Amino acid sequence: MKYTSIITLVFFLVISASTVAAQSTEVSDDIVVRAGINAALTLTGERALDFGSDITDGDSDAVLTPDNSGGIDSEINTGTGAETGQFDLSGVDEATVVLTFGDVTLEGNATNQTINFVPMIVQNGGGAILTTETADLDAGGDATFWVGGTLEMEDEDIDPDFFSGEFTLTIDYEL
């Protein structure tokens, strides 16, 4: 009977140890699963930026500062018919977007001279030049951006000519 008790005790200890070992090796936890579904962004260049057709001083910078409604806040050394450029954007309601843009080299049609264009961008209703390069879409998922800037002509002795170039604005959702 003594052996039966010892065998029963050993059997009980082996079963208990394997149960404890099985319970202590299995663990679990949870993570959050997220997905951001964005509407496609649509960017349309609506209006060309025009410093005017009769700038008379090719030795001074021309500056056209846009206001927040598409007009001209201030202008220096611009010509007749000057107007700000315009981009319209649509996407997700109240989303934050990142704007990427840079200087543009404008080339003369006849003289092969160049002028550096330094852009300024103002968001519709914002009033401030976007130096942070981010902007928020409105409750309807829209934004309008007005483009002005500076033609760097000071000390360049620019000859009379028509100058042009392409300004590219790239926009993506902020991640």
Image (cartoon, rainbow, N blue to C red):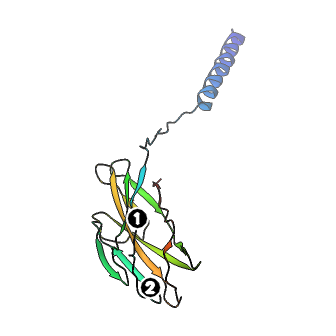
Residue 97 vertical position relative to residue 148 in the rendered view, above or below: above
Q: Is mark 2 on a helix, strand or loop?
A: loop
The foreground one among 101 and 172 is 101
Secondary structure beneath dot 1 equals loop
Q: Position of residue 102 (x, y in %)?
A: 51, 69
Q: Is 158 placed left or right of 14 in the picture?
A: left
- 97, 160: nearer the viewer: 160
Asked where in the image residue 5 lies, by quadrant, the reply is top right
Q: Residue 48 bears which disc, if any?
A: 1
| Looking at the image, residue 5 lies above or below residue 128 | above
User: Residue 61 — which label?
Assistant: 2
Residue ranking furthest to the right: 3
Query: Looking at the image, which is closer to me, 124 or 154?
Result: 154
State which tag comes first along the sequence, 1 or 2. 1
Residue 126 horizontal/vertical position (percent): 30, 66
Q: Badge 2: how crowded within 10 Å, few (<14), some, or many (20+)? A: many
- Look at discs 1 and 2 and give the one toward the viewer: 1
What kind of residue is marked 2? Answer: Asp
Left/right of residue 149 with respect to residue 102 in the rendered view: left
At 43% from the left and 88% from the top, the residue drawn is 57
**Residue 25, percent from left and from top:** 62, 31
Image quarter (top left, top right, bottom left or bottom right) of the N terminus: top right
Question: Residue sitting at 59 percent across and 27 percent down?
Answer: 23
Query: What amino acid does circle 1 point to?
Result: Ala
Rendered position, 47 above or below 67: above
Write the residue at 39% across / 55% down: 96
